[in-house]
Image: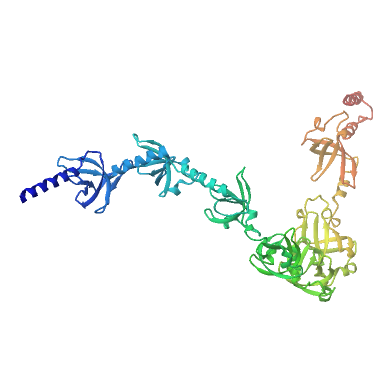
């Protein structure tokens, strides 16, 4: 009886197990549990009479390469039956199950707009390859709301939506931009609904320009203009803000129609210029920080958001070329408040006013005629600027450097040189002392009138050659001018044609004015005058042979000897009327000319060709006699023939 009961129980248990055993088919999706790890893969309990085998490695579906299955004992996993072999082993694929699941998500995203998580794998032509379970293409135009560098996204996880899908050809196209636009529109609607002027809102810096900062308030941008960043001066916005930085700003204007929002940072705190005159009072000495240097002055931060200007003229009692000579950026200085204009938001400060004015008792400190040690600060064409002390400057004019002529200041002085100088004038209006170097020495011009006289021949040395002549040193600090016209009887273009620097020569004084410190000398008057020789060799009325050297519109120049030529006017070339000298003459031709004029003042010679020809023809003998004094028939015929020829020429 007991055996029959046990047999019945066994049959019932077997029937129960048979009911639980599923029918397995290839391609079926099954959920199983990892039982153990074998040699070829994992053994997975799939509620079948035999366990399934999941290989350690599988070929990737919808993407390149292989997939490695790494599982733990007891872990549940979805698989697809890929094969039931002859020995009854059931082979499973986790990758194919994942691939089918991925396509379910892809189709749902395409049809219903489901958002998928994707991993950016690599950059390809025209866009990116992303992994959404299978490889999908993300076009560059669908990556972001604005163009961006695609390389920055490689390796990142992003959200996308499927916009094209072809399972047969395994082709999927996704868009990140669509997800961003949807989120942007949602946040924009929420922001606009709650936006009010006067609110203080948080935002993220999206873009920085030279005129302001664009801040994302939540789907819509607000502009933080550079003028609304601070009550004080603002430097480069890039130094104050960074993209992605979260800031708080006050909404100061909102135009719903244009969707324009204006923001302000500075209005989060009170305007420091309100009641500024109660804190910064005229006449007081205050401390401040140098925040800017300009050519015209210095800006000093008196307190946060409040700056004052020290004009360059108020930096020092002395001359200041540029503010950096007195202060530098970041200096903490004391200055006197000169003016406060709250309406124009201007404060005028003075640095020099903190110190005594050195010109208050200038005549006592530096009496007229006294000798002072000064420092050469600057050289220019008109003289030298010198420093006496801080706030007291002066100048030494070019003519006060030496008793002799000085062309350039650096012939006597150099920058930063310390020299003794005599005060010859005090200019209070221009706050400048006038100095002289030469008046500390004896004036040699006082003795010139006693030493030399006009007409005297003296010896000197060439000091300088100029375009207009030369300067000749007659004694130390006494120079005379030798004009270009007084160097030689011959025309000169420059003194260097005849003279050289350092040359010693004799000259004659032709002008002497000690009171004007002027002496004019001549070398020419000591030389023989070649014009006298010319007049002797070529007297008026004489006939000579010369060479045509130049033809001009009004005549021709004929060279009589080297260096001397005369002009044959066009009217003196021929008895016949001609319009140009070139009709009858050519350069290089030798001709007979008659001297018809000698101009002593201009040293010019007037010549005539036609008068020379006429005079030569008239020299033909009018009387021809034989040895016995009787006229022959040939003489008569010859004279008649000559007259006929002469008339024909006329």
User: Residue 531 vs residue 1: left or right?
Assistant: right
254 w.r.t. 320: above or below: above
Query: Residue at position x 40%, y 49% from top?
Result: 155
Report how many numbered discs are placed on residues in the image: 0
Q: Position of residue 116 (x, y in %)?
A: 40, 44
400 w.r.t. 81: above or below: below
Q: Quadrant of residue 268?
A: bottom right
Q: Position of residue 181 (x, y in %)?
A: 50, 43
Q: Quadrant of residue 462?
A: bottom right
Please name whichever residue, 196 or 403, is drawn nearer the observer in this view of the structure: 196
Query: Residue at position x 79%, y 66% from top?
Result: 395
Please name whichever residue, 433 or 380, is drawn nearer the observer in this view of the structure: 433
Q: Is residue 213 visible?
A: yes
Please name whichever residue, 292 or 421, is drawn nearer the observer in this view of the structure: 292
Q: Is residue 234 visible?
A: no
Where is the C terminus found, in terms of image quarters? Answer: top right
Q: Residue placed farthest to the front in the image? A: 1
Please name whichever residue, 495 or 364, is drawn nearer the observer in this view of the structure: 364
Query: Residue at position x 19%, y 47% from top?
Result: 51
Q: Position of residue 134 (x, y in %)?
A: 35, 42
- Colouring rule applied to residues: rainbow
């Amino acid at each position: 009886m007991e055996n029959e009961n046990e047999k019945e129980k066994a049959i019932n248990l077997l029937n129960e197990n048979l009911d639980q055993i599923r029918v397995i088919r290839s391609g079926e999706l099954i959920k199983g549990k990892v039982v153990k790890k074998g040699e070829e893969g994992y053994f997975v309990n799939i509620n079948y009479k035999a366990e399934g085998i999941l290989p350690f490695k599988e070929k990737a579906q919808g993407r390149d390469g292989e997939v490695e299955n790494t599982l733990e004992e007891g872990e549940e996993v979805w698989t697809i039956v890929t094969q039931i072999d002859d020995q009854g082993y059931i082979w499973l694929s986790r990758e194919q199950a994942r691939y089918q699941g991925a396509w379910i998500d892809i189709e749902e995203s395409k049809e219903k707009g489901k958002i998928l998580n994707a991993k950016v794998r690599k950059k390809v032509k025209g866009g990116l390859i992303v992994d959404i379970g299978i490889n999908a293409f993300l076009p560059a135009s669908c990556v972001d709301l604005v163009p961006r560098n695609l390389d920055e996204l490689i390796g990142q996880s992003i959200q996308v939506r499927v916009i094209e899908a072809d399972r047969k050809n395994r082709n999927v196209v996704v868009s990140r931009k669509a997800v961003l636009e949807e989120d942007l529109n949602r946040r924009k609607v929420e922001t606009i609904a709650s936006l009010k002027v006067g609110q203080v809102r948080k935002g993220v810096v999206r873009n920085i320009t030279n005129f302001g900062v664009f801040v994302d308030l939540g789907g819509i941008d607000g502009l933080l203009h550079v003028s609304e960043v601070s009550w004080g001066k603002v430097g480069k916005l890039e130094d104050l803000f960074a993209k992605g930085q979260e800031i708080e700003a006050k909404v100061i204007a909102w135009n719903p129609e244009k969707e324009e929002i204006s923001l302000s940072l500075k209005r989060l705190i009170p305007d420091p210029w309100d009641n500024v005159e109660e804190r910064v009072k005229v006449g007081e000495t205050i401390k401040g920080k140098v925040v800017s240097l300009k050519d015209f002055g210095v800006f000093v931060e008196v307190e946060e958001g409040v700056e004052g200007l020290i004009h360059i003229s108020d930096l020092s009692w002395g001359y200041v070329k540029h503010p950096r000579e007195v202060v530098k950026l970041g200096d903490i200085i004391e200055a006197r408040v000169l003016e406060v204009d709250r309406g124009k938001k201007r404060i005028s400060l003075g640095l020099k006013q903190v110190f005594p004015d050195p010109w208050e008792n200038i005549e006592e400190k530096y009496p007229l005629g006294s000798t002072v040690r000064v420092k050469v600060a600057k050289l220019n064409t008109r003289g030298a600027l010198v420093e006496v002390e801080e706030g007291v400057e002066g100048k030494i004019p070019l003519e006060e450097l030496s008793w002799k002529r000085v062309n350039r200041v650096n012939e006597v002085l150099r920058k930063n040189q310390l020299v003794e100088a005599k005060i010859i004038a005090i200019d209070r209006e221009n706050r400048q002392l006038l100095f002289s170097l030469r008046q500390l020495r004896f004036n040699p011009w006082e003795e010139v009138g006693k030493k030399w006289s006009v007409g005297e021949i003296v010896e000197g040395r060439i000091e300088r050659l100029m375009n207009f002549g030369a300067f000749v040193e007659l004694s130390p600090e006494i120079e005379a001018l030798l004009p270009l016209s007084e160097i030689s009887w011959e025309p000169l273009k420059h003194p260097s044609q005849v003279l050289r620097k350092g040359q010693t020569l004799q000259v004659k004084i032709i002008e002497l004015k000690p009171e004007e410190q002027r002496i004019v000398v001549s070398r020419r008057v000591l030389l023989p005058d070649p014009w006298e020789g010319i007049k002797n060799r070529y007297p008026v009325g004489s006939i000579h042979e010369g060479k045509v050297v130049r033809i001009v519109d009004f005549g021709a120049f004929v060279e009589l000897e080297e260096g001397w030529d005369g002009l044959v006017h066009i009217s003196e070339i021929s008895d016949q009327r001609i319009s140009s000298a070139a009709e009858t003459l050519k350069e290089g031709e030798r001709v007979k000319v008659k001297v018809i004029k000698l101009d002593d003042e201009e040293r010019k010679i007037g010549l005539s060709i036609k008068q020379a020809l006429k005079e030569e023809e008239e020299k033909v003998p009018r009387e021809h006699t034989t040895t016995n004094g009787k006229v022959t028939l040939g003489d008569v015929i010859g004279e008649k023939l000559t007259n006929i020829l002469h008339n024909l020429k006329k």
